Amino acid sequence: MATQHSRTAARLMISPAVILLFLWMIVPLAMTLYFSFLRYNLLMPGMEEWAGFSNYRYFLTDPAFFTALRNTLVLVAGVLMITVTGGVLLALLLDQPMWGQGIVRILVIAPFFVMPTVSALVWTNMFMNPVNGLFAHAAKAMGLQPYDFLAQSPLLSITLIVAWQWLPFATLILLTALQSLDREQMEAAAMDGAGPLSRFIYITVPHLTRSITVVILIQTIFLLSVFAEILVTTNGGPGTASTTLTYLVYVQSMLQFDVGGGAAGGIVAVILANIVAIFLMRMIGRNLDA
Amino acid sequence: MGRITLRNVSKRFGDVTVIPPINLEIGDGEFVVFVGPSGCGKSTLLRLIAGLEDVSGGVIEIDGVNATGLPPARRGLAMVFQSYALYPHMSVRRNIAFPLKMAGMDPSEIARKVEAAAAVLNLTGYLDRRPGQLSGGQRQRVAIGRAIVREPKAFLFDEPLSNLDAALRVNMRLEISELHQTLKTTMIYVTHDQVEAMTMADKIVVLNQGRIEQVGSPLDLYRSPANLFVAGFIGSPKMNLIGGPEAARHGAVTMGLRPEHIDLSTSDGTWRGTVGMSEHLGSDTFLRVQVEGLGMITVRTGGDSGLRHGDAVCLTPQPGRVHRFDADGKAMA
């Protein structure tokens, strides 16, 4: 059916969707870019004027910027490390034949269905609260001083909450990958004298690399824009200890009413995301090739 | 050395008995083929010997040492799987080297052995390719290479040729037989294909529903099948099995007669019939003859037989070639 005629018809028919998608992407981006060059403050509406690169200058020289940049990368890397290692281990456990497998798997997936705001609230108030939290109670029961997670190590706490949410995703993807591992390969390795650890290193891990790559790529996209968990738990504080780039953009535009500065921050975040994406594709992208 | 003895070995999956207690002796250097229809337990039996399944009862001895509880790696056996089970992310070289690496062998020694194995199997040019870039026959050879580098006490083959096309299968059959001649190592080979069994084996073990029906050399099984099952399974096309008064006339409940042991004539003979379907193979022709009172009888005749559908023919069983079976299906002396 690939005649010249059918190809032209196909292009014609697919074009509305392509055009719509293109506009969907380009209009917000263009507007953000436009705003980022304006002096645009919500407290002074109607006073917009061309500002050149001053928004960028202010955003990039803001002392909070480098903290936010560092925090963003630490958060993403931390969550990735926890979810990938934890995901592999959990998937290995869940792959074992056991009683009540279906129910256990649903339980494992459950955190993924909890909204970020809700899970952050639950964690802050029921687990990490230094007075009422379960961890505090546990510490007191053992005669220890309760630890104020969100005040003393806010970024770590948020990393843990986000990791808890994303662990099911990693587990699920890696579990399906494990299930597609050829049983005869494992048996062949066993006959070849490979113990459980060698089998894991030489057979399971290479088999999982592609799925791990997918997990890392997808999670990075979503983790760069983590917001609700920070807003609900620490508001980016204490100080800027848990402010990420996304949160800084929010502070700039919604708390300081500086839309121009916020837009400049947004563009910086887009550039950062692209740099991360390029690095990731360089490092692990070739795993996706069949 | 590679003497394997099974004593009352049995296997149950839950309440289902897959293999009732069986005894089997496999001598050093023998080429033994387990043959039977699918689901007869032949692969399970092989996996029991390999240690990939636990026995439910009985003892497996390898070279006189009780190996029943040993993990697969410590039994000193090598296995070639039906799916080849090559490691897809490793080059051919690393695939073949894997068992040696696991054994902690010196890298230069490993390299030497891999080269030697590759030379034997005509894989030298392919050592740096991945299994995904090889043809079926080459993958098969890599799997065999991975088995021979370990210099095992015995090779276990689990239907290794079933994924190959017909021409390649004949080639690989010869190669494996030649390998056995060179290495003189015990080989246990599982197949459902009785032609593979007949052509390769020193000793055939015919299995049916987990039971051993008969053990013997290919020609023993062909000439004197112990029961109806073996009679019907060994030989292609199948032996004609005839019951009723004609069998009673020979003093048996069922009589068996191979297609190649019937003389064909157009004028006179013991039975009269009409030719039905015929299969022309070039060298031979197999005629399906409808004989009154007996049903369909398959007859082998020369490739240039001029007989056509509907022709009347006469059949005569060759004297001394009739197999007789009693009511239990056992062969009568």
Image (spheres, rainbow, N blue to C red):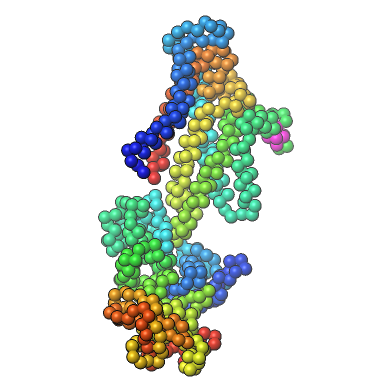
What stretch of residues is rendered in magenta? Answer: A133-140
As displayed, is residue A8 above or below residue A53? Answer: below
Image coordinates for residue B315, horizontal then vertical, percent:
38, 88
Left or right? Give the position of B51 relative to B319.
Answer: right
**Screen quadrant of the N terminus of chain B:** bottom left
Q: Give how far across and how far down residue A182 sits, in percent.
A: 47, 55
In the drawing, does residue A21 fall left or right of residue B202?
A: right
Relative to B63, residue A42 above or below:
above
Q: Residue at x 45, y 8 (%)?
A: A50
Q: How many numbered tags mark residues here?
A: 0
Tell me the residue at 39%/36% (across/down).
Answer: A10
Does the magenta run of residues contain A188? no
The chief SS type of the magenta part is helix
Q: Is residue B31 visible?
A: no
Q: Is residue A162 above or below residue B287?
A: above
Residue A183 drawn at (x, y percent): 48, 57
